[in-house]
Image (spheres, helix red, strand yellow):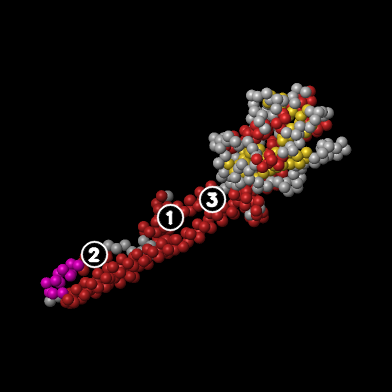
Amino acid sequence: MKAHRKVKFTRIQAQFSDLFGLNRTMAWCIIALIVVVFILAMYWFFHLAPPKTITMTSGPEGSIYQRQAAKYQAILARNGVKLKIVPSQGSLENLKRLADPSVRVDIGFVQGGIATDTKIDALVSLGSLYSSPILIFYRSKVPVELLSQFAGKRLSIGPDGSGLHVLARTLLAANGIEPGGTTVLLDTDADDAEKDLLSGKIDAVFMMGETASPDIIRALLRAPGVRLFNFTQADAYVRRKVFFNKLNLPRGAMDFGKDIPPHDVSLIGPTIELVARDGLHPALSDLLLEAAHEVHGNAGLYRRQGEFPAPLEHEYRLSPDALRFYKSGKSYLYRSLPFWVASTINRILVVFVPVIVVMIPLVKSIPAIYRWKIRLVIYRWYRMLLALERDILRAEPEQQQDLLQRLDEIEQAVNKMKVPASFADQFYVLRGHIGFVRSRLKTEQP
């Protein structure tokens, strides 16, 4: 069996040598080069394939993040990609997971304004998905116009470690309210905070408009003596804090018949971004953004139809693949073919077409270079023969032996030459010319 394979390889080498006019060594070198390039191309072809499973860090069980992640999961499944959803405590934990290389997650929902103490150089944004306003409900007989007026009050600012907690602390600090002072900051969740506010145990509660239960928001808007804080300084906040956007809750938006709220309310809030690790496969980036358009593209209380997702750059740099998608959409292949078929064709175009374009001229040039080298060697012996023949015409009788020795050395060297079959004619012509010079030398001898 081994002998059979050896004979087969020898035939391939012989055919290669005859085809390109190469000797055995050069033929094997080119065969080895082609094999190595093919192996590397195959490795790169499979390396460029998008993974079939990606992991998303979402949010608490039953949260809006969790529900949205489930929608992404269903959309990606239609394209043969499995989305693994890992629950979390919210945006802050999502960000920490993404920033930690030891945690195996690829993408996650992250609220703007919480990356103050986290290194985010290796993270990119695929775009803003929607704006989430900060709602502050408070008990007061008269409207409160400034956040600084909550100094000395009992405030619920969301569970410790949540994105809401971080933003509430940021807003209060900007108004001179810090932990440890006369203001009591409580880490209660929305359900408990609603009950405490209605019972009078606390004076105000911070909530996120997109994550708090609609039932809780409606109950607080209808509750006697409870008001929704109107950010009269909204324009100033969005200028000073780039991760905030100004939003508007129109009059009657919650209940037309009861006119709730009874007037337009200015709000501020961050955008929720789809954040990924740098290096996310471009095809998966396109697939996720396509899903984002389906999940977040509809009109809502705080957004217009088609307003999101949007390439709004805040704390995280926008992914180049995402920018390309927002400008031109999916490529023709991915628009026209199923995801995995398009991925395969795209990788063939990226890997094998350039290899073929480069390898064909390269392989064609090697025999030409080799033939040029052989010709130089043959020409070198011809130059020596010409010089020897000129010396024969001018030589004295006592120099004949030296000339004959030089000719013998040339002949021995030529006989040791290894040339491919394509140069056999030139090789034998050279040997014939050596014989001609030898006969010439003998006729010149006394």
Q: Quadrant of residue 33?
A: bottom left
Spot the residue most to the right.
Answer: 257
Q: Circle 2 — which element?
A: helix
Tell me the residue that label 3 is attached to: 45
**Residue 324: in magenta span:** no
- Between 375 and 67, which is closer to the camera in this rendering? 67
Q: Quick one: label 1 or label 3, which is nearer the N terminus?
A: 1
Q: Quick one: label 1 or label 2, which is nearer the N terminus?
A: 1
Principal SS element in the magenta part?
helix
Q: Residue at x 41, y 57 (%)?
A: 30
Q: Circle 1 — which element?
A: helix
Left or right, 204 with reference to 365: right
- Between 62 and 117, which is closer to the camera in this rendering? 117
Tell me the residue that label 2 is attached to: 412
Q: Residue at x 77, y 33 (%)?
A: 228
CA–CA distance in space, label 1 to label 2: 34 Å
Near mark 1 (Cα within 10 A), the count class, few <14, some 14-19 or many ≥20, is: some
Find the magenta span and give its range.
395-406
Say whether marks 1 and 2 touch (CB < 8 Å): no
Tell me the residue that label 1 is attached to: 33
